[in-house]
Image (cartoon, rainbow, N blue to C red):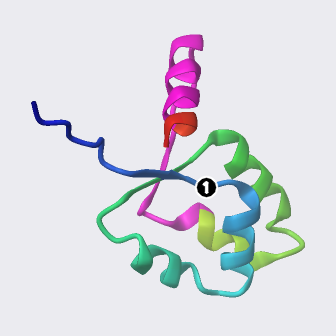
Amino acid sequence: MSHTQPAPVFVFDAMCLNHFARAERLDVLRDLLAGVTCLTTHVVREEIRAGVEDFPALQAVLDTDWLGIARLDSLEEISCFAQRVLSG
């Protein structure tokens, strides 16, 4: 019997994205994770958006094309997300 691991998925919080963006090194994060699914949540994006006025470099997070949005619209999606995070 063959057990295959699910493809890795990274879900980023505001602190990580904030630090890379303010250091103007989101490109490094993107390059390190090439080929890996990278996500964040709507809540994190709103937290980043709230900081753009004070730290314009944060706009780069909102403009990325490699950082998807983890949909967490239903209890089932939240449950699946939590199980995946906890099992990783």
- Where is 61 relative to 69, above or below? below
Q: Within the image, what quadrant is residue 50 found in? A: bottom right
Q: Whole-percent x and y of residue 62?
A: 60, 61
Apparent side of residue 78 relative to residue 47 in the rendered image (left or right): left
Q: Residue placed at 65% from the left, 87% from the top?
A: 24
SS at badge 1 = loop
Q: Residue at x 77, y 77 (%)?
A: 56
Residue at the spot of label 1: 12
Q: Nearer the viewer, residue 73 or 82?
A: 82
**Does 47 appear above or below 56?**
above
**Image quadrant occupied by the N terminus:** top left
Is residue 65 left or right of 83 when viewed as pictured? left
Q: Amino acid at mark 1?
A: Phe
Q: Quadrant of residue 60?
A: bottom right
Residue 6: percent from left, percent from top: 30, 41
Magenta highlight range: 62-84
Q: Residue at x 42, y 63 (%)?
A: 65
Count the marks: how many?
A: 1
Q: Residue furthest top?
A: 75
Image x and y of residue 17, in percent: 67, 66
Q: Is residue 52 magenta?
A: no
| Magenta region includes residue 64 | yes
Q: On the picture, is 39 further left or further right than 54?
A: left
Residue lying at the far front of the rendered structure: 1
Residue visible at 50% across and 84% down in the picture: 28
- Give the class, few, some or many, for how many residues have Cα within 10 Å of label 1's Cα (few <14, many ≥20): some
- The image position of residue 88, as x and y in percent, is 49, 43
Between 86 and 33, the residue placed more toward the observer is: 86
Q: Residue furthest left?
A: 1
Taking depth in this image into account, of 68 and 86 the one nearest to the observer is 86
Q: Nearer the viewer, residue 81 or 22?
A: 81
